[in-house]
Image: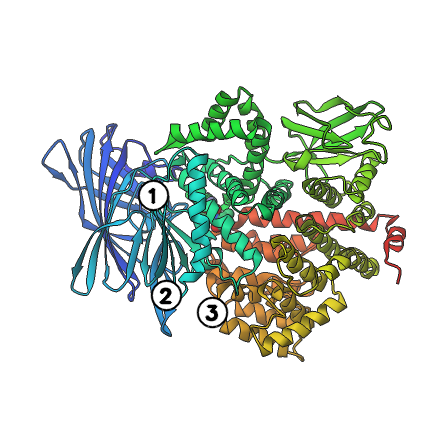
C-alpha cells in the first residue's frame, strides 16, 4: 500500500472496496417526530482483512460529527482518529483516511451523526396520519435498495452481512418497532429507551425501524413465533385477514424450504405513505395500507386477493432474500422473481378456489409484453452505479423472473425442484448467492443441464416465437426472437417445448435447442378417435414456457374449433388469445383474424379467461379509434356483443354463495362495458351511483362494482354538468379507507371533457393527494391525452423533484406517453425529454416511446387490412 495514495481512488466505483468489512452494528437512534430530525451513534465492529489506511463505507444526506469519528483496534489500546473525513456526495460514500495502516484484525469504528426525517419515502422518513382529528407524524424506514446509508453510515451492499443491535430513544407513549423483539425498556422522563435483541447476520437493506401510534392483533405459532399486524388506532380488525394468511403461509414455507422461520417474531405494519407496495424487512414487513388491510364490508375481492399475494410474497423473502441474499443487485431477480412465483404456490394452497395459477398468466403476459421490446434488458443485468439499481425492479425481474422459474419447475418436476430449493436454502443460509449457485444446486439434484438451459433465459433479453407448420406426418418448428416491432432478433434459446394433439392425454415434451426442428406427429389426422370431430394441436401446454407460438392457418383454425368446442384448458385458452394478440400488434397477423378468434370465446364464462379477453378487447377498441375511426363504432359493437351475454348472466347484484372469481368477473366485465360505452350498462351504473349517494351502505353498489359506476359517472360529466364529478370528489375527501380513495382517484382523469381532465390532474399536485397515490390518478382517456401531455410538460420540474424515486417517476412518464399512437408524437416527446432524462426513468421512457412507435406501425398495418371491412360486417351483431 502506498501511503500517499489518495482517497480519490474510491470515487466513481460500482462497489465498495473489500479490505475491511462490518461484523456487527451497535446502533442508537433518536428521532424527533415534531422537528422531523434524528440523531444517532453507530459503533461498527469491523474486520480489516488487507492492508489499508482507509475505511470506506456509505453515507448520504447525513451530517457526520467529525469529532466523534474514531477507530479502535482490538490489538492496541490506542484510539485512532482519521486525518481525513471525506463525504463524496455523488458516490454516497464516506472515506475515513488514517495516517498509518490499520492493524489487520477486528476493530470498532464509532460515528455520531444527525439527519432529517425526509418526506421522500426513502431512507428514514416521516409519514403523516391523523389521530383524534389531529395531524401526527410517524417515522418509518425504507432501505431497499440502497438507502440505509441515509439513516446511518454503513456498508450498504447486500453482501456485507452483519448483525444489528439497535437501541432507540422515543417518546414513552409511542410504539417503536424494529426487526427483533424488545429485550429491555427503560423510562427516562418523557422518553423511553428501548433495546432490541441482536439480529442474526443480515443485509443493511433489510433493517427497519417504525415509530408511531399503533394498534395490533396477534397470533402465536406452535413454535412460539409471535406474529402481529399493526394498524392505525381503531383499524386493527382490518388486519385479521392478513394475519390469518401470514400464519398459514409461515407454516407452509417452513415445510417447503425445510427451514423454520429464523426470527422470534414477525410484525407486519400498514404505513400511510409508502413508495412501493410492500417491503420485506427482516421481521418487520411494511405495507401500503391497500396491500395489508382488508374489511369484509369495504374491500373488494380483488383487494383480498392482492393482500394474500402480497403477504405471501413478502413472507417468501424472509427465506429467499433475507436468509439467503443475492450477492449483488445483478441477481435481484432471484429475490423478486422467486418470491413472486412462490407466493402463488402459497396462495393456491390457502385458496384453491381462486384458481390462482391460472391467474399467474397475468404475470407471464406482462413479462412477455415488456420483454418483447427492443429496449428490454436481460434478467441478469450489470449494475455500475447505485442510481441504476431502482430501475430494475420491473416486469423483467418480477414477472419474467417468476415465469421462467415456473417453466423450470415444470420441466424438472415439483418434487425435484423443491428438494433442490431446500438444499440451496440450507447451503447459503446467512450468506449470499448468485444466479449460477442456484442453477448448480438444481443441476446436482436433477441431473439435467439446468445451467445451459437457464443461461439462455437469464443472460440474454427477449424470448422466442415458435412458428409451427403442419405437414402430413410431422410438425415443422422454427424459433426466432419475438419483437413487438415485427422485426426478428438474433437470439436463440433452449426451449422446453410441450405439445398435445386433440387431447391432453397425448402429450410430447422435448428441449428445442436449434433453430429448426421436425417433430413426428403423435396422432394422425382422421385416424385417432379423439380427433374425430376436429383436429387441433396446442403447443406450450398450460403456457408453462416463456415464449409465444405462431400457428399456420390450418392449425389456427383447429384451435378456434377447440376453443369453441371447449376442448382447451383455461390456461391454453388464455395462451391462444394472448399470443394471437401479440402477433397482431407485431403486424404478423391481421386484425381480422384476431376478431375471428375473439368470436370463438363467445361462450366463455370464466374470469381467468375473460379477464384476458377483456383487456384485448379494450386494446382493440383503443387502437381502432385512432386507426380506422369509420369502423370503430362497428368494432365496438362487436366487442360489446362478445361480453354482453355473460354480463347479463352475472348481473350487478352479488348472488348468495357465488364464487370469488365470479365476483371479480362482474367487476371486470361491467367496467369493460362502461369503457366500451355500452348504453344500458352506463345507465344502470348511474342509477346505482345515485342510490349510493343517498345511502353509502346500499346493497346496490358494493365495493366490487363501484369502479364501474364511478367510471360511468366520469364518462358523462363535463364542465357544464359537474354534479357527478363533485360527488366523486366528495367521496374521495370523505373516505377513510385508502382503497376507496384510490378507486376514485383511478377514474377522475378518465373523462372525455378536457377541462375536467386538467382539473383532476392538477388535484394530484395538491396536498389532498398523498405522493404515494398520485400515479393512480394518471389514467387518462384518449380524448384527454393531449391535455395530460401538456400538463406533464408544464409541471415537469415539480413532478420530477417530488416523485424522484424510480418507480414513481417512471409511472408518471409511462402513464401519459403510452397513450399516444403516432411517430410524430414519439418524436416530440423524445425531444422534450432529451435534456431532461435521468437514469431513474430513462429505460421506462425509451420503452414507452417504443410502444408508441409500435402502435403507429400497427395502425398502418390495420389500415392495410383489406378484408377488415367485410369481416366487421360479417361479425356485426344483427340488430
Ligand atoms: N422488495 C420489494 C419492495 C421494493 C420494490 C423495494 C422496489 C424497493 C424498490 C418487495 O418485496 C416487493 O416486491 N413488493 C411488491 C409487492 C409484491 C406483491 C409484488 C411491490 O412493492 O409492488
Ligand atoms: Zn419482493
Q: In the rendered image, which residue does mark 1 sit on?
A: 204
Is residue 498 depicted above or below 38 in this figure? above
Classify mark 1: residues with Cα within 10 Å, few (<14), some (14-19) or many (20+): many
Of 807 and 416, which appears nearest the observer? 416
Sequence-earlier tag: 2 or 1: 1
Mark 3: which secondary structure? loop
The label number, if any, that marks residue 233 in the structure image: 2
Quadrant where the image shows the N terminus: top left
> Tags 3 and 2 in contact by the CB under 8 Å rule?
no
Sequence-earlier tag: 3 or 2: 2
Where residue 549 appears, x then y in whole percent? 72, 35
Quadrant where the image shows the C terminus: bottom right
Residue drawn 28% across the image and 31% down it:
19
> Tags 1 and 3 in contact by the CB under 8 Å rule?
no
Q: CA distance from mark 1 to mark 3?
A: 35 Å
Check the image and tell me how it is coloured. Answer: rainbow
Residue drawn 61% across the image and 42% down it:
364
Q: CA distance from mark 2 to mark 1?
A: 30 Å
The label number, if any, that marks residue 403 in the structure image: none
Q: CA distance from mark 3 to mark 2?
A: 13 Å
Amino acid at each position: 500500500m502506498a501511503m500517499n495514495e489518495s482517497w480519490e481512488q474510491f470515487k466513481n466505483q460500482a462497489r465498495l472496496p473489500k479490505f475491511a468489512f462490518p461484523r456487527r452494528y451497535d446502533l442508537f437512534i433518536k428521532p424527533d417526530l415534531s422537528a422531523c430530525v434524528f440523531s444517532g451513534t453507530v459503533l461498527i465492529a469491523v474486520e480489516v482483512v488487507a492492508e489499508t489506511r482507509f475505511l470506506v463505507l456509505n453515507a448520504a444526506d447525513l451530517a457526520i460529527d467529525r469529532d466523534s469519528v474514531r477507530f479502535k483496534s482490538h490489538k492496541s489500546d490506542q484510539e485512532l482518529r482519521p486525518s481525513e473525513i471525506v463525504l463524496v456526495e455523488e458516490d454516497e460514500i464516506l472515506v475515513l483516511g488514517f495516517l498509518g495502516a490499520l492493524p489487520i484484525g477486528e476493530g470498532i469504528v464509532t460515528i455520531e451523526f444527525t439527519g432529517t426525517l425526509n418526506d421522500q419515502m426513502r431512507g428514514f422518513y416521516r409519514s403523516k396520519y391523523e389521530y383524534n382529528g389531529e395531524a401526527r407524524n410517524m417515522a418509518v424506514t425504507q432501505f431497499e435498495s440502497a438507502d440505509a446509508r441515509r439513516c446511518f453510515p454503513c456498508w450498504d451492499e447486500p453482501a456485507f452481512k452483519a448483525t444489528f443491535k439497535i437501541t432507540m430513544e422515543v417518546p414513552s407513549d409511542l410504539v417503536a418497532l424494529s426487526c427483533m423483539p424488545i429485550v429491555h425498556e427503560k423510562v427516562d422522563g418523557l422518553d423511553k429507551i428501548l433495546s432490541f435483541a441482536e439480529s442474526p447476520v443480515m443485509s443493511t437493506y433489510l433493517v427497519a425501524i417504525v415509530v408511531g401510534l399503533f394498534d395490533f392483533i396477534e397470533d402465536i405459532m406452535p413454535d412460539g413465533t409471535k406474529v402481529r399486524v399493526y394498524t392505525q388506532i381503531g383499524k386493527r380488525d382490518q388486519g385479521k385477514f392478513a394475519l390469518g394468511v401470514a400464519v398459514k403461509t409461515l407454516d407452509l414455507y417452513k415445510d417447503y424450504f425445510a427451514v423454520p422461520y429464523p426470527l422470534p417474531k414477525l410484525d407486519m405494519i400498514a404505513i400511510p405513505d409508502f413508495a412501493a407496495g410492500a417491503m420485506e424487512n427482516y421481521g418487520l414487513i411494511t405495507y401500503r395500507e391497500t396491500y395489508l388491510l382488508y374489511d369484509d364490508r369495504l374491500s373488494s375481492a380483488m383487494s383480498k386477493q392482492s393482500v394474500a399475494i402480497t403477504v405471501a410474497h413478502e413472507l417468501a423473502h424472509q427465506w429467499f432474500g433475507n436468509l439467503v441474499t443475492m450477492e449483488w443487485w445483478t441477481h435481484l431477480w432471484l429475490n423478486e422473481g422467486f418470491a413472486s412465483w412462490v407466493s402463488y404456490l402459497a396462495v393456491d394452497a390457502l385458496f384453491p378456489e381462486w384458481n390462482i395459477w391460472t391467474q399467474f398468466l397475468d404475470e407471464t403476459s406482462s413479462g412477455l409484453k415488456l420483454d418483447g421490446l427492443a429496449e428490454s434488458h436481460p434478467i441478469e443485468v450489470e449494475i455500475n452505479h447505485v442510481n441504476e439499481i431502482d430501475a430494475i425492479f420491473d416486469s423483467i425481474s418480477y414477472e419474467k423472473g417468476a415465469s421462467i422459474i415456473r417453466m423450470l419447475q415444470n420441466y424438472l418436476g415439483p418434487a425435484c425442484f423443491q428438494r433442490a430449493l431446500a438444499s440451496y436454502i440450507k447451503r447459503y443460509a446467512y450468506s449470499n448467492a448468485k444466479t449460477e449457485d442456484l442453477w448448480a444446486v438444481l443441476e446436482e439434484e436433477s441431473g439435467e443441464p439446468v445451467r445451459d438451459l437457464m443461461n439462455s433465459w437469464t443472460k440474454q433479453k427477449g424470448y422466442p416465437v415458435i412458428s409451427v407448420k403442419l405437414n402430413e406426418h410431422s410438425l415443422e418448428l422454427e424459433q426466432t426472437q419475438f419483437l413487438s416491432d415485427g422485426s426478428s432478433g438474433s437470439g436463440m434459446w433452449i426451449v422446453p417445448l410441450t405439445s398435445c394433439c386433440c387431447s391432453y392425454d397425448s402429450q410430447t415434451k422435448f428441449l428445442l435447442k436449434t433453430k429448426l426442428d421436425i417433430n413426428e406427429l403423435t396422432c394422425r389426422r382422421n385416424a385417432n378417435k379423439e380427433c374425430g370431430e376436429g383436429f387441433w394441436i396446442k403447443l406450450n401446454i398450460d403456457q408453462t414456457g416463456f415464449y409465444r407460438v405462431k400457428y399456420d392457418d390450418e392449425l389456427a383454425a383447429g384451435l378456434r374449433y377447440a376453443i369453441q368446442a371447449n376442448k382447451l384448458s383455461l390456461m391454453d385458452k388464455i395462451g391462444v388469445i394472448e399470443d394471437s394478440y401479440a402477433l397482431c400488434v407485431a403486424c404478423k397477423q391481421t386484425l381480422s383474424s384476431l376478431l375471428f378468434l375473439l368470436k370463438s370465446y363467445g361462450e366463455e364464462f370464466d374470469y381467468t379467461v375473460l379477464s384476458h379477453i377483456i383487456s384485448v378487447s379494450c386494446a382493440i377498441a383503443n387502437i381502432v379509434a385512432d386507426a380506422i375511426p369509420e369502423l370503430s363504432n362497428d368494432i365496438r359493437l362487436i366487442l360489446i356483443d362478445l361480453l354482453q351475454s355473460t354480463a347479463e348472466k352475472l348481473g350487478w347484484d352479488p348472488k348468495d354463495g357465488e364464487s370469488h372469481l365470479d365476483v371479480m368477473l362482474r367487476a371486470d366485465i361491467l367496467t369493460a362495458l362502461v369503457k366500451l360505452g355500452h348504453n344500458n350498462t352506463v345507465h344502470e351504473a348511474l342509477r346505482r351511483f345515485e342510490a349510493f349517494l343517498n345511502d353509502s351502505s346500499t346493497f346496490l353498489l358494493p365495493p366490487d362494482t363501484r369502479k364501474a359506476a364511478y367510471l360511468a359517472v366520469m364518462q358523462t360529466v363535463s364542465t357544464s354538468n359537474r354534479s357527478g364529478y363533485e360527488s366523486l370528489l366528495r367521496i374521495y375527501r370523505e373516505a377513510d379507507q385508502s382503497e376507496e380513495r384510490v378507486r376514485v382517484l383511478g377514474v377522475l382523469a378518465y373523462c372525455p371533457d378536457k377541462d375536467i381532465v386538467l382539473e383532476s390532474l392538477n388535484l394530484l399536485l395538491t396536498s389532498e393527494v398523498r405522493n404515494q397515490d398520485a400515479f393512480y390518478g394518471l389514467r387518462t382517456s384518449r380524448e384527454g391525452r393531449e391535455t395530460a401531455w401538456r400538463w406533464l410538460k408544464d409541471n415537469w420540474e415539480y413532478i420530477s423533484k417530488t416523485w424522484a424515486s424510480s418507480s414513481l417517476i417512471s409511472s408518471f412518464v409511462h402513464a401519459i406517453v403510452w397513450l399516444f399512437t403516432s411517430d410524430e408524437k414519439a418524436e416530440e416527446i423524445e425531444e422534450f425529454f432529451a435534456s431532461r432524462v435521468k437514469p431513474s426513468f430513462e429505460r421506462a421512457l425509451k420503452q414507452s416511446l417504443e410502444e408508441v412507435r409500435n402502435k403507429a406501425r400497427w395502425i398502418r398495418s390495420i389500415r392495410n387490412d383489406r378484408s377488415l371491412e367485410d369481416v366487421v360486417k360479417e361479425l356485426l351483431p344483427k340488430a
